[in-house]
Amino acid sequence: MNNHAILNALAEIEKFTNGDSKKALMELGNQYIGKGPDEIVTNQSTYEAAVIIKKASAQINEIVHAFGIINCLPSILQKGEIIESLSLASAASGEGIDLVTNIRIAEFKFSEWQKSNANGTRKRAICADYVSLLLNDDPRKKELYVFDAERISLYLQSKKAEWKHVLSKHPKLLNRLQDKNIEGKYLCDLYNPNKIEILDLKDYLSK
């Protein structure tokens, strides 16, 4: 995918939305009310433009993850601390470790939760990373870097969300956790601030 294709796609989408995608889509939907199959006017160019931008956005997420970690490192690392491994490709599997040094292991999540409750995918990803750290037997300190750490900490203390359900998209982690014979079925039964520290990315990116 080249820059020319992305720029053309952005121009196509801007032409359609005119700066307000919700309004444009509502007006588009209204145009089709009362029409039958012979009256439907398709728009292949706008669809293809959206597909191009979607693919490019996935690549951007990888770059945000990579450079977000790198930009945090000067504020996170202590004097004499040495990086042993660094996984910069973003993933939601919860089975890899983003940062390993001689004194810590850490995971990073750069997605920001919406103010509404529609954060299902983000919640599953955060929980997977948290459980991955929890199951790691490495004696080094464990940290999870996120945006809005207080809100995420409260979620991980939930007495309503069942960890089997939240981890249903991560069967390997779920199986490993079940093998531990954890007492309790809610996220609060997994939460342990003494083992994993949850830190706010804004405190490190702004320095």
Image (cartoon, rainbow, N blue to C red):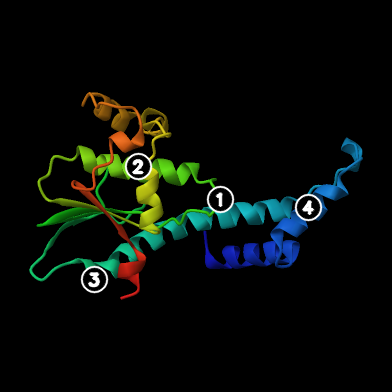
Q: Is label 2 in a helix, a strand or a loop?
A: loop
Location of the C terminus (image quadrant):
bottom left
The disc at residue 75 is: 3
Q: Amino acid at mark 4?
A: Met
Report the side of 90 relative to 35 (left or right): left
Please rate how many residues cluster around mark 2, counting C-alpha atoms within 10 Å: few if below 14, some from 14 to 19, many from 20. some
Q: Is label 4 in a helix, a strand or a loop?
A: helix
Q: Which residue is mark 1?
A: 116
Front tag of 4 and 1: 1
Q: Amino acid at mark 3?
A: Ser
The earlier-in-sequence mark between 3 and 4 is: 4
The earlier-in-sequence mark between 3 and 1 is: 3
The disc at residue 26 is: 4
* Residue depicted at 65% across the width and 57% down the height: 49
Q: CA distance from mark 2 to mark 1?
A: 18 Å
Mark 4 in CB contact with mark 1 (< 8 angstroms): no
